[in-house]
Image: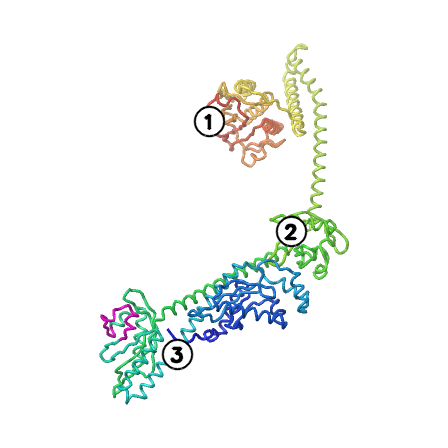
Amino acid sequence: MDASPTPQYAELVDLPKLQELMESFSQVLGTANAVLGPDGEIIARAGWVDACVRFHRREGQSCQRCVDSVRARMAHLAAGARPGTYVCPNGLVDAIAPIEVEGRVVGAVLTGQFFTAPPDLGYFRRQAQGFGFEEAAYLEAIGRVPVLSGARAEEITRLYARLAATLAESGLERLRHRRTNLELQRLNRELEDRAAARTAELAASEERLRLALAIASAGWFELHVPTGAVVVSPEYVRLLGHDPQQFSTSFEYWIEHVHPDDQPEVRRLFAEGVRRRGVSEATYRRRRMSGDWLWITSAAEVVDWSSDGRPLRLIGVHRDVTQRKQQEAELERYRNELEHLLLERTTALDETSARLALTLFAMERAGVGIAWNDPATGRFLHVNQECSRQFGYSTEEMQRMTIPQLNPDHPSQSYQDMVAAIRASPNGMTFQTTHRRKDGSCYPAEVTAYVTHSATQEWLISFFHDITGRKAAEAELIQAKDAAENASRTKNAFLATVSHELRTPLNAIIGFSSLVRDGVLGPVPGPLAHPLDIIHRSGQQLLDLVTEILDLTSIEAGNLRVDLAPQRLRPLLVEQCESLQVQAGERGIELRPVQCEDALEALVDRRRLSQVLRNLLSNAVKFTDQGHVVVSARRVSDRVVVEVCDSGIGIPPDQLAQLFRPFVRVRDGAGSVRPGTGLGLAISKRIVEAMGGEIGVDSRPAGGSRFWFSVPAVHAAAVPATAVPPG
């Protein structure tokens, strides 16, 4: 190793690059830093806070306290004290770690000017008075001092110190390398100048060469150029891991053990070196006996030439620079990581800025007012153009105002309660309130507000929507709803009154026409039989229409009552089929036997269920010109599914969605409408739903129809379940 004293840190590094590196670290990590010399002098610094730059280091007494404190810390580090954090006499916290090169403290790295807990402003107010600082500006500067974890600061400081030591060790290697080269050049010049007396001086020269190589931790070699024979020093043999007593080599043996990727360059440099005078240098990888690779720097010069200018003897040194290469690689890795981190942070910031700009632009166009307020006072810090437009003030005017001034719903105390509620809501809070414009008018607004903060500041961010139009639309909707409900009630009352008034004369017409038609009042002349039958049938149809209107009116008025009780389904289905047997026979329709288990029961209203079955069966017969109608029932899980299937004209797809609405009647393929009121299915749907069931239909034109409904089953375990669902 070099026996000379280790140079000062400032002599070992490139100071402008060191300053650039410190500034990069300060920007990325957000901390103040400095590199100090052995006596506490500042070699480089970056990111210092205003509290130090504008105050502590400006005033004589406070500045001297800083200087004395740093010198004392440097003395402690030189004496072997452990690195760590400390509070400087002016109240800020610093972390310090030594820069050690070859066991000697050549400087220190300081990460400072922070707090580990919120500062005692009373202490700094007294300090401002004691040193004559302008108090408000000083306390503002103190408020911007970051708060960091002590452990985090020490970790950052140790990282700085390791990097600074790596830079210093690399600089020391370069310095020693230059010294070695200078020493070799001096020796070579001395050999040339004393060529006549080289025999006498050979021993002394070899000793000096040995010492020089020892200083450089290297080995020497001598090459006989014409034959390629190589002689090397014991130090060189040991460097390559050989036994000095068994080592012998030649130029070709030596070049074969150079890394394959480096061989072309080494051969080129060698060829150039033996054709000219002066020192040639090359850095390459050489394999040790153990198989690992060393980084070697060789410096050599031709010292003997023939009379015709051919090289005869070349002398040089090999130096192990593996550690230097590793340090350079580590430093390069740190630099690349730092550049990558800086690029990631920059890219993320650019993306965030772009998204924020697009969001603000979109909100501006969407009529969303945005405001940033001080939560403590309610003062507007910043507003967008839409916010200014809603209130009728300019941006400058609003920045002189507070929320309580513009919001009559939130005077000062109410405002503080509102902020507390928003602060307690992690996802913000949305509410409706009233805003006062500049002209004194008020308008309803919907506000979404959040409280957010950074390390040093807190903001209340609010998004305003003028909901005047929405409120007006809601009022119109309520008014329209009330009008519709009144009209519906009036319609129902009218229908109920008219229907009741019609039923009495209809019952009379039907009764007397039946008496006359059946001959109870005397023989009926032949020509009158058919007209009497028409009168009776028409009266019955009109009575059915009145009954259905009364049912629908009662249902829509919420007066539909169902008395649910267990009912065996098969007798009900058979009864309804038998009641339509004559009508089906007249139309030539086959009414097939009921398909239902005898024990199958459902929880239904018997009278209402009969009404639903009658509606579905009469529709099936009405819309079937030829073929059959069949009724079936089965249990599916805890439900009973009843189906009425026919082979009739079917229903077009565009009419299916309207089928269960009042007064909707199906048109056949020719576009004609068959007799009926269009109320039966609408009433059936409401009855089934009132019994806790649902109703539906599957159909296609000319392919028949399948109407089904489901109701709750009773004693389900008594009947085997089927997996077939409705439809």
Mark 2, other Cα within 10 Å: few <14 / some 14–19 / many ≥20: many
Residue that badge 2 annotates: 449
* Mark 3 → mark 2, Cα distance in angstroms: 69 Å
Foreground mark, 3 or 2? 3
Foreground mark, 1 or 3? 3
Q: Position of residue 614 (x, y in %)?
A: 58, 23
| Label 1 close to label 3 by CB (< 8 Å) | no
Mark 1, other Cα within 10 Å: few <14 / some 14–19 / many ≥20: few
- Judged from this view, the residue extending furthest toward the right is 440
* Mark 1 → mark 3, Cα distance in angstroms: 100 Å
| Label 2 close to label 1 by CB (< 8 Å) | no
**In the image, is residue 160 above or below residue 586?**
below
Q: Position of residue 223 (x, y in %)?
A: 26, 78
Give the side of residue 291 with respect to residue 326, left or right: left
- Was residue 474 drawn as part of the magenta stretch in this picture? no
Q: What residue is at 28 percent from the left and 82 percent from the top?
A: 203
Please provide the residue range marked out in magenta: 232-252
Residue that badge 3 annotates: 179
Of 669 and 490, the residue lying toward us: 490
- Judged from this view, the residue extending furthest toward the front is 79
Residue that badge 1 annotates: 722
Give the side of residue 296 with respect to residue 544, left or right: left
Q: Position of residue 527 (x, y in %)?
A: 64, 16
Q: Earlier in the sequence, mark 2 or mark 1?
A: 2
The quadrant in which residue 354 appears is: bottom right
The three-letter code of the residue at mark 3 reads: Arg
Q: Secondary structure at mark 1?
A: loop
Specify the label residue 386 is tagged with. none
Of 406 and 134, the residue lying toward us: 134
- Was residue 238 drawn as part of the magenta stretch in this picture? yes
